[in-house]
Image (cartoon, helix red, strand yellow):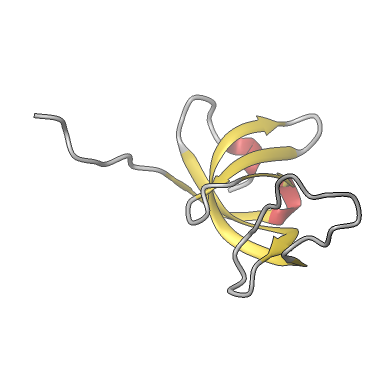
Amino acid sequence: MEIQDIPAGESWACKFKTTTFLDKEGMPIEAYNLALGQAHPGVPGEYQGIGVIQVRDIDAKRVQLQDVDSLKQFTVEFEDCWDFDTIEWTGEQPS
């Protein structure tokens, strides 16, 4: 299956890769309020994860995903996504 074949309105996820800043454990890290000249706490590297597809841009061939481990959002090229599958949302029902 290709990302273009995913029906609109359905919940899907996929594996993806992106280049971002990583911490020592290889998880994405963000730095806030860095002063001019202050070093970023992470190191650049390739991150691979599983992301819930939020927005697809067919024309630009990009997809916005929310990583299930870090909960961070990433925008990646279609070519950096693979292994698409549907999502079954589960959870406890309020009583």
User: Residue shown at 84%/58% (left/top)?
Assistant: 38
Farthest front residue?
35
Residue 54 sits in which quadrant? top right
Residue at screen point 58% across, 47% down? 72
Count of picture labels: 0
At 72% from the left and 65% from the top, the residue drawn is: 42
| Residue in the image at 58% along x and 48% along y | 1
Left or right: residue 13 versus residue 61 is left
Q: Quadrant of the C terminus?
A: top left
The residue nearer to you, when weighing 17 against 1, is: 17
Q: Is residue 77 above or below residue 9?
A: below
Give the answer, above or below, for where 25 lies relative to 12. Answer: below
Choose between 86 and 48: the one closer to the eye.
48
Image spot of residue 12 (x, y percent): 48, 41
Between residue 27 and residue 52, name the one nearer to us: 27
Q: Position of residue 57 (x, y in %)?
A: 72, 30
Horizontal side of 16 relative to 43 (left or right) equals: left
Farthest-out residue, left: 95
Q: Residue furthest bottom?
A: 24
- Position of 67 compared to 36: left or right? left
Would residue 86 be found to the left or right of residue 34 on screen?
A: left
Q: Position of residue 86 (x, y in %)?
A: 43, 44
| Coordinates of residue 35 in the picture (x, y in percent) | 83, 49
Outermost residue toward the right in this view:
37
